Amino acid sequence: MDSALSDPHNGSAEAGGAANGTTRPPSTPEGIALAYGSLLLMALLPIFFGALRSVRCARGKNASDMPETITSRDAARFPIIASCTLLGLYLFFKIFSQEYINLLLSMYFFVLGILALSHTISPFMNKFFPASFPNRQYQLLFTQGSGENKEEIINYEFDAKDLVCLGLSSIVGIWYLLRKHWIANNLFGLAFSLNGVELLHLNNVSTGCILLGGLFIYDVFWVFGTNVMVTVAKSFEAPIKLVFPQDLLEKGLEADNFAMLGLGDIVIPGIFIALLLRFDISLKKNTHTYFYTSFAAYIFGLGLTIFIMHIFKHAQPALLYLVPACIGFPVLVALAKGEVTEMFSYEESNPKDAAAVTEGSKEGTEASASKGLEKKEK
């Protein structure tokens, strides 16, 4: 998982020279400002809209659209799993040919990116379809076993509108696969980020603190303690980071001197900010105080990251600044309002478990009613 903000020209270890061995010309102040302003804006969009969509997702009744709930146990293990994955990728790039590894990864993210982008644009595209559009329903069902032991592996419901979105997303996917263009990369990266914030839910604030605290240590160690994260981020040709060229004003769309922001710096704080939005709604006060506070804290933390990186000319672990801001600001507001107990006692149940309980209750009710009917007939 990439989670570092880096500036290839201004300090991080990228082979930044041109093909003839000469170094790139220094980035202009305007180009640097445009690049980091764009990265900041691109980071805010999936957090804001993903948080709003996470509220609808939590209330959804369709089992296939229910979010994945992260528990405290999952949060504690996540930094260890992420570290093993990161180190494994680093060793792979050192041992095997980078070209073939990136080819496999490109195919993998090509499929995932199309699905993520299709899911992202579907709500917006629905507004453009005419009422007369023949919107047929489809279901993709893949099961294992038979009889009472039959288990659903895939149960995906979609319609003709989803197929249109899938077709449009496939065009972007082919563009990315053939050209690896930074705009196609960012479209996939934004889709991954928005889907992550929407579909990954923390069950409570304590779990969020455990997750962010663990990844705080993870980020600092792998960026400052080793060159592993920066090396993987620059060797990994996959849409796991947002990029923006600092030489866009000079070279246009063919610019190639990129500043980058890992998707981990968006999704991890984003799911915590989305949790605070759902907590705001649970208070039923018609205010979104904690959401806006944490959102402003994210802007402050990422802005501070960019400033520090520009001053010291070195890649920065963004979570080093984002985690204290995103946790500290809302907690201070809760202290001022006397709502710390309410904040840390707020709990979200696993919607899949709730659905299973509801389904079990429904089946039990139907069984009881059936037995009652049989007795009446006798």
Image (cartoon, rainbow, N blue to C red):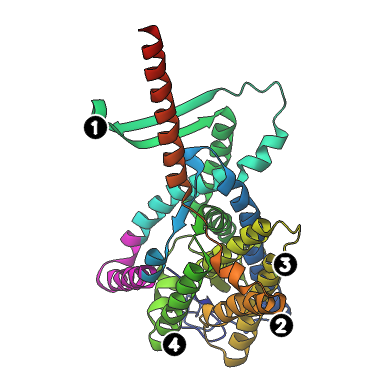
Which residue is more in the foreground, 63 or 306? 63
Q: Amino acid at mark 4?
A: Phe
Q: Which residue position is annotated with label 4?
A: 224
Mark 3 element type: helix
- Give the residue displayed 55% in from the left and 62% down from the top: 271
Q: Mark 2 or 4, which is nearer the eye?
A: 4
Magenta span of residues: 77-101
Q: Quadrant of residue 294?
A: bottom right
Q: Dot 2: within a 10 Å radius of its alpha carbon, few (fewer than 14), some, or many (20 or more) residues?
A: few
Quarter of image, res 96: bottom left
Q: Which residue is mark 2?
A: 29
Identify whether 335 is placed above or below 351. below
Q: Kindly report the distance in space between the C-alpha atoms of the residues bearing marks 4 and 1.
A: 51 Å
The residue located at (73%, 78%) in the rendering is 30
In the image, 33 versus 62, the foreground residue is 62
Tell me which secondary structure the magenta stretch mostly adopts.
helix
Task: Name the N-terminal-most of marks 3 and 1.
Answer: 1
Q: Is residue 93 magenta?
A: yes
On the question of residue 126 being in view, the answer is yes
> Which label sits in the foreground, 2 or 1?
1
Nearest the viewer among 71 and 141 is 71
Q: Position of residue 176 (x, y in %)?
A: 51, 53
Residue under the point 43% across and 76% down: 214
- Residue 107 in percent (x, y) is at 39, 50
In space, the residues marked 4 and 3 are separated at their CA atoms by: 35 Å
Checking the image for residue 149, the label placed there is: 1
Q: Amino acid at mark 3?
A: Thr
The residue singled out by tag 3 in the image is 289
Label 3 to label 1, Cα distance in Å?
Answer: 48 Å
